[in-house]
Image (cartoon, helix red, strand yellow):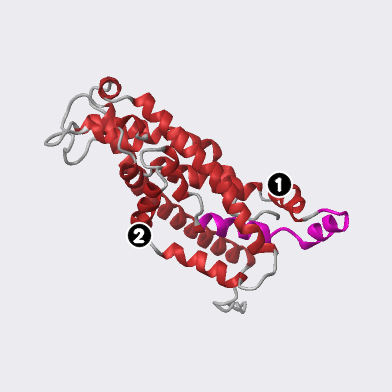
Amino acid sequence: MTDITTLPASAATPATRSKTFNYQRWLNRSLHYLVLSALAVITVYPFWWTLVTAVSTAGKVYAFPPALLPTEPGLQNFLEVFQTINVWAFYKNSILISGATVVGTLIICSLAAYPIARMRFAGRNFVFGAIVATMILPSEVNFLINFITVSKLGLTDTISGVVLPNLAGAVGIFLMKQAFEAVPQDLIDAAKVDGANEWEVFWKIMLPLAKPALGALAILTLVSAWNQYIWPSIVMTSVENFPLSVGVSYLKGAFSFKTRLVAAGAVLTVLPILIMFLFTQRYFLRGFEGAVK
């Protein structure tokens, strides 16, 4: 008789351990992608429903289960939007407001973040803490005091009245501060040894190295400025000065409105900023990785 010795159950061969490891990794990755897919569906569905509603020219809008494909697709709803409101004028106002907000935010947030990040002065931490503390307050809290200020300056019903209160944001200052702090101190010391002053250090060293953060801040600011509705509707009183986000509200009447027409206006509002983000998302993601790797 041949004595057969069995291996302990805990003593698995390398091949068995490899298979177990691969199975666990595959299971974890599958669960990861399943959760991401569910989140993607939840996020994308409202936009897809709006697009289907805007393109459809027949069928029930609020049918259940909702239609996932357009019924008798056509562009009639979009043509009616252009006939109902002055879309091009609203587009122009939105571009002016968004462009001015982006440029002003990049300038002011960069200038505010640099001394907080790289200079030493009394009360520096208190100032930064006070700026960050404003992030817990909703923007609507500032509407009253901002409107009083804008009115006293005679800026109501102007693009400046919409832009100025939105230039200095805590998120922008925080983002630029983190980017400036990631720049090695050796570069700044070398520049000062060569005779560079603070402005030259800021302009020639800090800003070029913080381009990813500047890009991310520009995209965040552009999306926020393009989509803002409440503040422009408070400041603006003339219809010809409305941005597109406010102008599309004229697609609905006092007692009734066409859902497909409103959906088409919403698509026209979201489409430009969505296309721009698709082409610039890599710069947006790089902005949160730090200024210098």
Q: Residue at x 48, y 60 (%)?
A: 28
Q: Looking at the image, can residue 168 be seen? A: yes
Q: Position of residue 101 (x, y in %)?
A: 49, 43
Relative horizontal placement of residue 269, taking residue 219 as reference (left or right):
left
Q: Which mark is residue 41?
A: none
Q: Position of residue 191 (x, y in %)?
A: 83, 55
Relative horizontal placement of residue 106, taking residue 115 as reference (left or right):
left
Residue at which label 2 appears = 141
Please name the predominant secondary structure of the magenta segment in the image: helix
Highlighted magenta segment, given as a residue range? 171-196
Residue at which label 1 appears = 208
- Tell me how far mark 1 sits from mark 2, CA to CA: 35 Å
Q: Residue furthest right?
A: 194
Image quadrant in which you'd find residue 136: bottom left
Image quadrant in which you'd find residue 264: top left
Asked whether 91 falls inside the magenta stretch, the response is no
Q: Position of residue 192 (x, y in %)?
A: 83, 58
Q: Earlier in the sequence, mark 1 or mark 2?
A: 2
Q: Amino acid at mark 1?
A: Pro
Label 2: how many residues lie within 10 Å, few (<14), some (14-19) or many (20+)? Answer: few
Q: Position of residue 184 (x, y in %)?
A: 76, 60
Q: Residue at x 59, y 71 (%)?
A: 125
Quadrant of the drawing holding the C terminus:
bottom right
Q: Residue furthest left?
A: 255
Label 1: how many residues lie within 10 Å, few (<14), some (14-19) or many (20+)? Answer: few
Q: Amino acid at mark 2?
A: Val
Of tags 1 and 2, the one toward the viewer is 2
